[in-house]
Image (spheres, grey):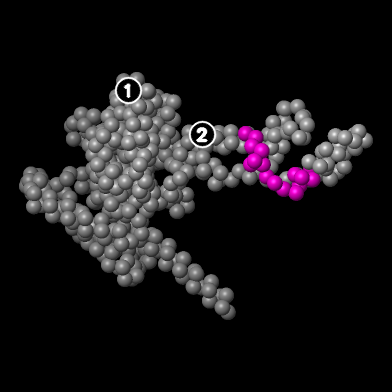
C-alpha cells in the first residue's frame, strides 16, 4: 500500500465505481440525498417485491439497462445547484424532513432484510484527507468525519443483518512515514478506540464485540492499553463483530499464520494425544525385539522399516539434526503432510469469522492495498466506489447491496436449475 493510501483509512485510507452507480460520485454534498433517496426507494422496492414473489429476472443485461435508465432519468435531480443548495440544507435540517428521512431509512433497511444479506463485509476506508482538502478543513477534522461515517455504516450493517464488519484502520506500511504523522495517527487511534469503548451504545445495542487484528508489538504501550480496554469492555457481546485491522497487512497476517502452524507442528504430541494405531503397536513390539537381539539389531527386517503411520512422523522427520534415540523415548509429531489450506486458515486473524462476502473500497482507487488477500475467495464480490469515505452512507451502500442480492439470486436460480437437470438425468 502506498504512503498516500495508507494514511487515509479509518484513521484514513485511500477504488472506481462502475456504471450504473457513477451517479453516486456526484452526491458528495448532503443536500443531494433527497433526489438520491428517490432513486434508492425505487430500486429497493423493485428488488423486495420481485424477491418476495420469486419473480427476479436473471437477465443481467436487462437488469443493468433498467437500473441505468432509472439513474439517467433522475440524474438531473441530483445535479448541484447553487441557488437551491442552502434551501436544500435548510429543508434537510428541519425536524419533519429529518424524521421522514429516518423512517425511510428504516423502510429501506427492512426491505433489504427480506433478501440475502452478506454475513461478512470489509471496508477500505479511503479518502479522509482528500475530503478535508476539497472542503478546505483540517486533516484531523476529515478523519473525525471518517469516524462518523464508520459509525453510520456500522449501524446500517448490523441493522441489516451483517454479522462481521472488518475495517482497514492502519497499515504496517504507515510506519514508513514521518514520526510526526505516525504519532498523530496513533493518538487518533487511541481516541477513537476510547470513544468506541466508553460511548459504545451502538456496539452494545447490536451486541457487537471489538477485535483488533494486527501486530501488537509495533504499537506503543498507551495505545495498547486503549486496545485492551476496548476489547475487554465489549467481550461480553457475541451477536456481531467489529474487526479493526491495526496495524495490519495481509502478507504479515499470512506469514504469522504459517509461522504459528510450523510451531504447532514442531511440538511433540503429549502422551495422551498420540494416535492409537495397530501400526504403532507393531513398531513398538518390533523395536523391543530388535533391542534385545544383537543379530536382529544388525539386520532389521524390511517390514520394520517400511510400516509407517500415516497420521504422524518421528522426531527425525522434522528434526533431522537430532541424534537417534531409543524408540521408547522418541517424540511423536504431527505429520506435515496433513497441512492444508484449512490448517493455515485456522491460524488467520479471522479464523472464527464467516467467509468474506463483500469488500468495498471508497475514493476511486482500484487496488486491495495488501488487505484481506487470504480471505478474498472465488465468491467474494469486490466493489470500488468513487465517493470519499466521509461521504459514504446508506445511499452509497444501498446500490452495492442491491447488486449483491441480484447476483446471489442469480446464483441460487442457476444452482436450482442445475439441480433439477441432474435429478431428471438420474431418473432417466
Screen quadrant of the N terminus:
top left
Q: Residue at x 38, y 59 (%)?
A: 407
Q: Residue at x 32, y 53 (%)?
A: 161
Q: Nearer the viewer, residue 393 or 234?
A: 234
* Few, some or many residues within 10 Å of mark 2 (<14, 14–19, 20+): some
Q: How many marks?
A: 2
The spot of residue 359 in percent (x, y) is: 38, 47
Q: Nearer the viewer, residue 384 or 266?
A: 266
Screen quadrant of the C terminus:
bottom right
The spot of residue 272 in percent (x, y) is: 64, 41
Is there a contact, CB below 8 Å, between mark 2 and mark 1? no
> Is residue 384 part of the magenta span, yes or no?
no
Give the labeled residue for mark 2. Answer: 256
Which label is found at residue 362?
none
Q: Is residue 173 left or right of residue 79?
A: right
- Quadrant for residue 367, please give it: top left
Q: Residue at x 32, y 22 (%)?
A: 183
Real-space CA distance between mark 2 and mark 1, rounded to the nearest whole angstrom: 25 Å
First reached walking from the N terminus: tag 2 or tag 1: 1
Residue lying farthest to the right in this orientation: 295
Residue lying farthest to the top in this orientation: 179
Q: Which residues are magenta?
A: 267-283
Give the labeled residue for mark 1. Answer: 183
- Quadrant for residue 201, please give it: top left
> Is residue 63 visible in the rendered structure shown here?
yes
Amino acid at each position: 500500500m502506498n504512503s498516500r493510501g495508507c494514511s487515509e483509512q479509518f484513521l484514513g485510507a485511500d477504488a472506481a465505481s462502475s456504471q450504473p452507480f457513477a451517479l453516486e460520485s456526484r452526491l458528495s454534498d448532503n443536500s443531494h440525498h433527497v433526489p438520491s433517496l428517490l432513486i434508492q426507494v425505487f430500486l429497493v422496492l423493485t428488488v423486495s417485491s420481485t424477491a418476495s414473489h420469486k419473480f427476479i429476472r436473471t437477465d443481467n443485461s436487462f437488469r443493468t439497462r433498467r437500473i441505468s435508465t432509472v439513474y439517467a432519468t433522475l440524474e438531473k435531480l441530483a445535479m448541484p445547484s447553487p441557488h437551491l443548495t442552502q434551501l436544500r440544507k435548510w429543508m434537510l435540517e428541519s425536524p419533519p424532513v429529518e424524521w421522514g428521512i429516518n423512517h425511510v431509512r428504516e423502510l429501506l433497511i427492512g426491505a433489504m432484510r427480506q433478501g440475502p444479506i452478506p454475513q461478512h463485509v470489509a471496508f477500505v476506508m479511503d479518502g479522509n484527507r482528500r475530503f478535508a482538502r476539497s472542503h478546505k478543513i483540517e486533516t484531523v477534522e476529515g478523519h473525525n468525519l471518517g469516524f462518523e461515517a464508520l459509525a453510520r455504516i456500522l449501524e446500517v450493517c448490523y441493522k441489516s443483518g451483517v454479522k462481521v464488519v472488518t475495517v482497514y484502520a492502519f497499515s504496517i506500511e504507515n510506519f514508513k512515514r514521518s514520526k510526526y504523522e505516525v504519532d498523530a495517527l496513533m493518538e487518533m487511534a487511541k481516541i477513537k478506540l476510547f470513544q468506541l469503548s466508553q460511548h459504545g451504545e451502538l456496539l452494545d445495542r447490536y451486541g457487537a464485540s471489538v477485535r483488533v487484528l494486527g501486530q501488537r508489538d509495533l504499537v506503543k504501550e498507551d495505545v495498547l492499553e486503549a486496545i485492551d480496554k476496548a476489547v475487554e469492555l465489549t467481550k461480553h457481546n457475541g451477536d456481531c463483530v467489529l474487526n479493526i485491522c491495526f496495524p495490519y497487512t495481509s502478507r504479515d497476517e499470512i506469514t504469522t499464520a504459517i509461522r504459528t502452524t510450523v510451531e504447532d507442528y514442531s511440538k511433540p504430541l503429549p502422551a495422551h494425544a498420540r494416535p492409537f494405531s495397530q501400526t504403532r503397536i507393531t513398531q513398538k513390539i518390533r523395536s523391543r525385539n530388535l533391542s534385545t537381539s544383537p543379530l536382529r539389531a544388525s539386520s532389521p527386517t524390511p517390514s520394520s522399516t517400511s510400516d509407517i503411520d500415516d497420521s504422524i512422523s518421528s522426531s527425525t522427520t522434522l528434526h533431522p539434526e537430532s541424534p537417534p534415540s531409543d524408540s521408547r523415548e522418541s517424540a511423536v509429531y504431527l505429520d506435515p503432510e496433513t497441512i492444508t489450506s484449512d490448517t493455515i486458515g485456522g491460524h488467520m486473524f479471522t479464523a472464527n469469522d464467516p467467509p468474506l462476502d463483500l469488500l468495498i473500497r471508497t475514493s476511486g482507487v482500484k487496488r486491495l492495498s495488501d488487505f484481506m488477500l487470504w480471505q478474498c475467495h472465488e465468491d467474494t464480490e469486490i466493489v470500488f466506489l468513487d465517493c470519499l469515505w466521509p461521504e459514504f452512507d446508506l445511499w452509497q451502500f444501498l446500490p452495492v447491496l442491491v447488486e449483491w442480492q441480484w447476483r446471489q439470486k442469480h446464483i441460487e436460480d442457476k444452482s436450482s436449475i442445475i439441480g433439477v437437470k441432474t435429478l431428471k438425468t438420474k431418473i432417466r
